[in-house]
Image (spheres, rainbow, N blue to C red):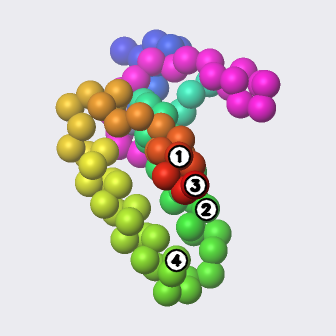
Amino acid sequence: MNTPNSAVCARDGCGFYVELVLVDDMPLPTTHCSDACADFEFLRRSLEAMEPAPDVIALYGNLRGVADVLDARTDPTDVGPLLGVIDGAGS
Ligand SMILES: [Zn+2]
């Protein structure tokens, strides 16, 4: 039985409880089990919107590595937000 509060993560298909998160000061229901999955989908969609240049193809390789890390988790919170990590490493 599904309850309105539960959903299935769009990335890895695991079940999670929907929570409201603030996105640009607007409360929106979460669509993924974790920040890592949501960020992963954001990055994947960003890559899909780009021309398939060699550096974009290299980024796809990086993304596959990230997917392996996410799939190896035993708990959705084992991996934190991806975008925060990338932002922190970029400077
Ligand atoms: Zn997930």
Could you say where residue 7 lies in the image, as x and y percent from the top left?
46, 26
Q: Amino acid at mark 3?
A: Ser
Q: Is residue 74 magenta?
A: no
Label 1 to label 4: alpha-carbon separation? 21 Å
Label 2 to label 4: alpha-carbon separation? 10 Å
Along the line of sight, the residue nearer the viewer: 91 or 2:
91
Residue that badge 1 annotates: 88
Residue that badge 4 annotates: 56
Residue range in magenta is: 10-28
Could you say where residue 33 lies in the image, as x and y percent from the top left?
42, 30
Mark 2 lies on a secondary structure that is: helix
Q: Residue at x 46, y 13 (%)?
A: 3
Q: Amino acid at mark 4?
A: Val
Q: Amino acid at mark 2?
A: Ser
Reading the chain from its start, which is encountered first: label 1 or label 4?
4
Reading the chain from its start, which is encountered first: label 2 or label 4?
2
Reading the chain from its start, which is encountered first: label 3 or label 2?
2
Residue that badge 2 annotates: 46
Depth check, mark 1 against mark 4: the one in front is 1
In-image side of 47 versus 26 (left or right) = left
In the image, residue 4 above or below residue 86:
above
